Image: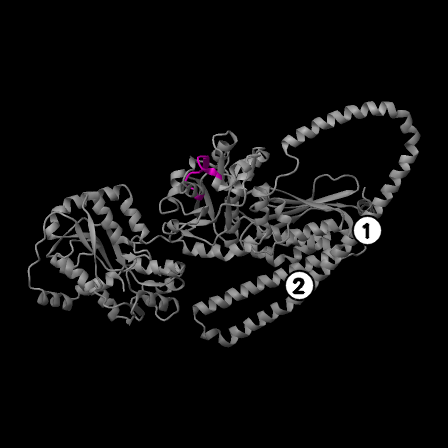
């Protein structure tokens, strides 16, 4: 039972009368001065007690702050009920309640401070029903934990059907399972329960509030002399941010939900987060967050933050989330976290050759050990007796302290430290001393109120961690170094120079002998080339066999998947016909979602089937009129072009030898791509014509549009299988179309390239051999290893 609901009993007229009748004695006089006694009744999040017996909660922490600011000691009196809680404050058995409403029973025997918080009482509903229930104040099943005091509350309950529960947790659970339409309880209590259960994204508070009230510090009249000091302390705490932080911590200020674009703070800490010259943001954690946001359909903007802002964490007025942060119990009380992205091992590093002198942690007594300030390595080192701790502000400074000899050892994340050393060309100058000392979990950190964002990220994190993109990023930032580092290249160049000089003298001396052996050597080389040619031919045959088998498998799989997709479509149609009228709006929306999802799956299966067929299809080349195939492709896409309001223009195109069906598919995919990625701000224009001048025996043509364009850094990526730059909700497509275009161009011995930049449209140029003989020669030349 929450404290506000327990205390509100005394606001009922009958309870007030009972108190008046049963309590005739005047307030017991208390000595002025001495400690203040505060009652303790465990009612989270206002007052609670941990497993170790430590007290916390808004009322408790505010009481402690007031005691510290005024220099008055605080002691606690453990009580069991709210009736005792109020009665003790009336009779002077306790003298302070920090953060209580101005309850009528307290007015005569207490003085009240300036407000410490303002609070509203609103109906809590499921987020998915918030729009439908907005403004509705009758005919609802409303869950309450009795008694529910106040005339406005009683009027609301009279117009609805109240459902009583023994605990707030039971009321919230029934809301989540559909047992009630809404609950009416203190907002901090509801939000705290939902957040602890990780379901805060599923609830919303309806405006306007049923009632609004303030919270104050109540001082018994016997200690009224402390009121000026208490008000002064509250003013200081409000000004320096401690009081707002306390309200935020215990959700007296309900966090705002997500709105539009989210702001991610970036603190320069390579290789996880990097602020490059010109304001571009990169780094492992930044790129991972971009990938997750793209998969989750979230819009992000990055901004640089200071170390103080980073330490404060995401919050209102600062930023919404951090790309990655170490998870600790203390931080969980300050911010929200997604599922962990990685377990980071923290290792002890020394200069190369000094590992045996250190011999692990036991050998660090009276040694200088550097760590990043505020990091788990810093905390771990600070707790160890005998170490001489050097706290540095950046990871670069930690490594530098070891390289320059200021530190005997450093304690730092293993992969990140090796990556920094590799970047500086110093990977050979450091080595890890034994196994990792500790391991820490890291995850994106969010401000409270972004439960829906957390849930969307959590939904894609498991798949992303298993993806090739994540593996590539780990390899990029933390993978093993390339063998040919700069020092090795310089050493190799010097050695090569010596070898060349020696070889020149040797060749002069051996000139005659080499001439005599020339024919024999040429014979051996010819035999080796023939052997290599046979080996290459065998490899090509194996590759062709594997490619054919893969294409056959893909084609068969896509063909077999068509039947289930068609069955699902038929079942959905039958369900809509037979039961559609009995479904509510939510049910209809679910059916619509299933229709759209099944249609997208069917389109993906069909595109996959076409792609598989293009990989394995081998037909003799015939003369092809590209004008006719372009016009046929435009006719196939006529409905799509008309729906988008696009205009298509064609210019005379050359003739080639090839597969007419595949070339028509190529035109069709490029036209569909131009329509899909048109710019809504201007009319869509598609032009098909000759491309840039091609070498003799080759022809080129270009499909140009004035759409949204593509950043140069993504020009290669768009031709990858299933690679997309936009969300499905923004632009439809399977991510196969451009891959299919590249496959068809390759089937004809040609290529496809793109010229584009964001906002300036795209031009896809296809270059093909004019005659089949040229294509055959190119394929034969490649097969012979030329």
Residues drawn in magenta: 363-376
User: For residue 757: magenta?
Assistant: no
Q: Is residue 668 left or right of residue 4?
A: right
Residue bearing mark 1? 538
Q: Residue at x 84, y 48 (%)?
A: 534
Res. 594 in view: yes
Q: Quadrant of residue 615?
A: bottom right
Mark number, residue 617: none
* Residue in the foreground of this view, choosing between 86 and 702: 86
Q: Position of residue 747 (x, y in %)?
A: 75, 51
* Residue in the foreground of this view, choosing between 312 and 153: 312
Q: Is residue 65 left or right of residue 450?
A: left
Q: Residue at x 16, y 43 (%)?
A: 229
Q: Quadrant of the N terminus?
A: bottom left
Res. 729 in view: no
Query: Mark 1 and mark 2 in contact (Cβ < 8 Å)?
Result: no
Which residue of the protein is positioned furthest toward the bottom in this rendering? 578
Front label number (2 vs 1) = 1
Q: Is residue 135 left or right of residue 107?
A: right
Q: Position of residue 227 (x, y in %)?
A: 14, 47
Q: Position of residue 328 (x, y in %)?
A: 41, 49
Secondary structure of the residue carrying tag 2 is: helix
Secondary structure of the residue carrying tag 1 is: helix
Q: Position of residue 225 (x, y in %)?
A: 11, 46
Residue bearing mark 2? 558
Instruction: Classify mark 2: residues with Cα within 10 Å, few (<14), some (14-19) or many (20+).
Output: many
Instruction: Classify mark 1: residues with Cα within 10 Å, few (<14), some (14-19) or many (20+).
Output: few
Q: Residue at x 64, y 69 (%)?
A: 563
Residue 336's place in the image compared with 275, above or below, is below
Q: Earlier in the sequence, mark 2 or mark 1?
A: 1
* Residue in the foreground of this view, choosing between 596 and 680: 596
Q: CA distance from mark 2 to mark 1?
A: 30 Å
């Amino acid at each position: 039972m929450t404290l506000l609901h327990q205390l509100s009993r005394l606001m009922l007229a009958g309870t007030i009368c009972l108190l008046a009748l049963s309590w005739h004695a005047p307030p017991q006089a208390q000595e002025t001065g001495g400690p203040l006694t505060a009652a303790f009744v465990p009612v989270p999040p206002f007052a609670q007690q941990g497993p170790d017996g430590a007290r916390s909660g808004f009322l408790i922490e505010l009481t402690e702050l007031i005691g510290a600011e005024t220099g008055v000691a605080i002691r606690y009196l453990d009580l069991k009920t709210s009736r005792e809680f109020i009665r003790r404050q009336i009779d002077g058995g306790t003298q302070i309640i920090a953060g209580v409403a101005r309850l009528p029973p307290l007015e005569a025997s207490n003085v009240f401070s300036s407000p410490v918080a303002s609070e509203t009482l609103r109906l809590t509903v499921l987020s998915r029903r918030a729009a439908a229930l907005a403004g509705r104040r009758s005919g609802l099943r409303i869950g309450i934990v009795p008694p529910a005091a106040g005339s406005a509350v009683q009027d609301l309950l009279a117009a609805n059907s109240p459902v009583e529960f023994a605990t707030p947790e039971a009321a919230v659970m029934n809301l989540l399972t559909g047992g009630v339409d809404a609950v009416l309880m203190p907002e901090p209590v509801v939000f705290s329960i939902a957040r602890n259960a990780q379901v805060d994204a599923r609830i919303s508070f309806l405006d306007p509030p049923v009632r609004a009230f303030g919270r104050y510090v109540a001082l018994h009249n016997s200690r009224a002399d402390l009121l000026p000091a208490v008000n002064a302390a509250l003013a200081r705490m409000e000004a320096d941010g401690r009081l707002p932080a306390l309200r935020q911590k215990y959700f007296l200020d309900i966090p705002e939900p997500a709105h539009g674009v989210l702001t991610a703070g970036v603190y320069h800490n390579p290789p996880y987060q990097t602020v490059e010259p010109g304001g571009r943001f990169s780094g492992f954690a930044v790129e991972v967050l971009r990938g997750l946001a793209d998969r989750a359909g979230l819009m992000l903007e990055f901004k640089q933050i200071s170390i103080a802002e980073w330490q404060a964490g995401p919050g209102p007025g600062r930023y919404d989330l951090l790309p990655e942060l170490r998870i600790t119990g203390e931080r969980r009380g300050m911010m929200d976290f997604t599922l962990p992205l990685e377990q980071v091992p923290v290792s002890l590093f020394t200069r190369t050759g000094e590992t045996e002198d250190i011999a692990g942690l036991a050998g660090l007594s009276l040694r200088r050990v550097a760590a990043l300030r505020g990091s788990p390595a810093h905390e771990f080192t600070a707790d160890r007796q005998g170490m001489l701790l050097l706290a540095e502000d950046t990871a670069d400074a930690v490594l530098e302290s070891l390289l320059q000899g200021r530190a005997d050892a450093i304690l730092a994340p293993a992969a990140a430290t090796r990556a920094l050393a590799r970047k500086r060309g110093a990977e050979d100058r450091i080595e890890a001393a034994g196994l990792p000392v500790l391991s820490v979990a890291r995850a994106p950190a969010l401000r409270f109120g972004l439960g829906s964002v957390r849930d969307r990220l959590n939904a894609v994190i498991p798949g992303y961690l298993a993806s090739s993109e994540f593996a590539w990023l780990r390899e990029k930032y933390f993978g093993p170094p390339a063998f040919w580092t700069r020092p090795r290249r310089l050493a190799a160049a010097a050695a090569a120079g010596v070898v060349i000089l020696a070889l020149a003298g040797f060749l002069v001396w051996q000139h005659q002998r080499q001439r005599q052996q020339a024919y024999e050597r040429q014979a051996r080389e010819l035999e080796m080339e023939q052997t290599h040619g046979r080996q290459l031919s065998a490899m090509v045959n194996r590759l062709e066999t594997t490619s054919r088998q893969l294409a056959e498998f893909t084609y068969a799989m896509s063909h077999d998947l068509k039947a289930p997709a068609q069955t699902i479509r038929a079942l959905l149609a039958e369900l809509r016909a037979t039961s559609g009228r009995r479904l509510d709006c939510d049910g209809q929306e679910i059916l619509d979602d299933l229709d759209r999802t099944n249609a997208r799956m069917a389109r993906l299966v069909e595109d996959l089937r076409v792609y598989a067929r293009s990989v394995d299809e081998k037909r003799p080349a015939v003369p092809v009129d590209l004008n006719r195939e372009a016009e046929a492709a435009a006719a196939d896409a006529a409905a799509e072009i008309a729906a988008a309001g696009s205009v298509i223009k064609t210019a005379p195109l050359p003739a080639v030898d090839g597969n007419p069906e595949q070339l028509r598919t190529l035109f069709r995919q490029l036209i569909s791509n131009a329509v899909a990625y048109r710019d809504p701000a201007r009319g869509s224009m598609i032009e098909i014509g000759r491309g840039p001048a091609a070498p003799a025996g080759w022809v080129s043509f270009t499909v140009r549009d004035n759409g949204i364009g593509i950043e140069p850094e993504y020009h290669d990526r768009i031709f990858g299988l299933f690679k997309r730059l936009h969300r499905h909700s923004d632009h439809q497509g399977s991510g196969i179309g451009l891959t299919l275009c590249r496959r068809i161009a390759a089937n004809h011995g040609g290529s496809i390239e793109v010229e584009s930049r964001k906002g300036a449209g795209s031009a896809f140029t296809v270059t093909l051999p004019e005659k089949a003989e040229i294509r055959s020669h190119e394929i034969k030349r490649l097969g012979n290893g030329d």
